[in-house]
Image (spheres, rainbow, N blue to C red):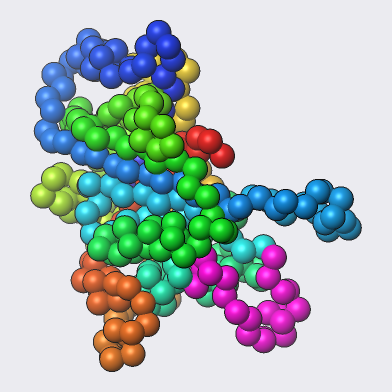
Amino acid sequence: MTITGVFFIPSNPNAPSALPILTERLRSVFAEEPIPIGRWALEHKLMRDTPSCLPASAHAPNPVPKPKYMQFLSLTHYPNHGFIYASEATDLPQASVAAGGSHRQTPLLGTISAAAGPPQAQAQSPTAAAGGAAPSSNASQSGMIMRTVPLSSYGPLFQHFMRACEPFWNHRHTVTVPAGVVYDIGDFRLRIGDVRQTFPQARARGTVVEVEWKGPSPLTSSSSSSPANFNEDGSSDSGIDVTTEPLDDSEIDAEYALVAQLIRDFWSQLGIEGAREAILVPDVGKEIKEQHRRRRAGENLKRKKPRTHDDDEEGWGWWDIEEDKNPDAGVDLARQYMEIYRFNR
């Protein structure tokens, strides 16, 4: 399994970029000369629902509704799909759901579900797809729903919310890493780059560092004999090693904790102060645990729904998502980036 950590160094008037310091530390701290092996980029967009114009007293005796967020992320090292992270719907009728009745989907969840493709291609449970209306063993800890959509649908879906749903959603910001650099140092792969805000106003936000563990599993010795598969640009193409025996949830949590400590130890050697960390964020490992559960239950991970004429009319990207060998690849990393990029909330 691919385990990563993300560190963000905010900019300040005296040092708008920590990139020169990071590059110098990499060369002075580690015996192996860090050689750039490639480039990478990302784009992140944050949207928030329109706040109510009513005073807090108007909601009594119910609590004031919490703000809802929707985040869009694209990464060049996951070129097959984009990531969408949206707040779960918490204001759906509970009685009708508990009684087995149906309810109309919110514009947010209905549109994302249509774009994400058929149910078997989505990692979330049916309860999460229904907006988290009823508790389950797979309930989200973060109160957010993660979806991946084909990259060809990623841009049109954002434009849909900008145009058709403008009264309900506000575009808060767009940040990019336009020209990041990739380094290999021992068992780690680093992606570093300057974060620049392009909307609503151009400004430097800081420097981001993605640390990916490429070494053998510190928990299961069998994984060391089964090297991970990598894309042409060197990034892992899978979040799960299907050649090993399925693990239970406690074993997966233990492996995440061990690798997280390895990543923290690596980062501490650089001596960079004031960085924000995102490693063991809420729901990290959720999809991997679900895949291991299905393997233990003897289910086939490569099930595909036969394409019909109705599929062509039902939503964007249904056929494309069947071509995506692993639609869950990178979801943990996306959660980490989205935890970091919460400016202007």
- Choose between 154 and 102: the one closer to the eye: 154
Is 102 a magenta residue? yes
- Choose between 306 and 267: the one closer to the eye: 306
Q: Is residue 259 above or below residue 266?
A: below
Which percent across, then down, holds residue 11? 41, 19
Residue under the image location 20 percent in, 14 percent down: 27
Which percent across, then down, holds residue 329? 31, 56
Write down the quadrant of residue 316 in the picture: bottom left
Residue under the image location 36 percent in, 16 percent down: 16
Q: Is residue 31 above or below residue 218?
A: above
Q: Is residue 183 above or below residue 85?
A: above
Query: 244 left or right of 90?
Result: left
Which percent across, then down, holds residue 224? 23, 47
Write down the quadrant of residue 147 in the picture: bottom left
Residue under the image location 21 percent in, 39 percent down: 40
Residue under the image location 37 percent in, 82 percent down: 314
Is 134 a magenta residue? no
Query: 339 left or right of 306?
Result: right
Residue 189 in view in this figure: no
**Which residues are drawn in magenta?**
91-110
Residue 311 in view in this figure: yes
Query: 210 left or right of 95?
Result: left
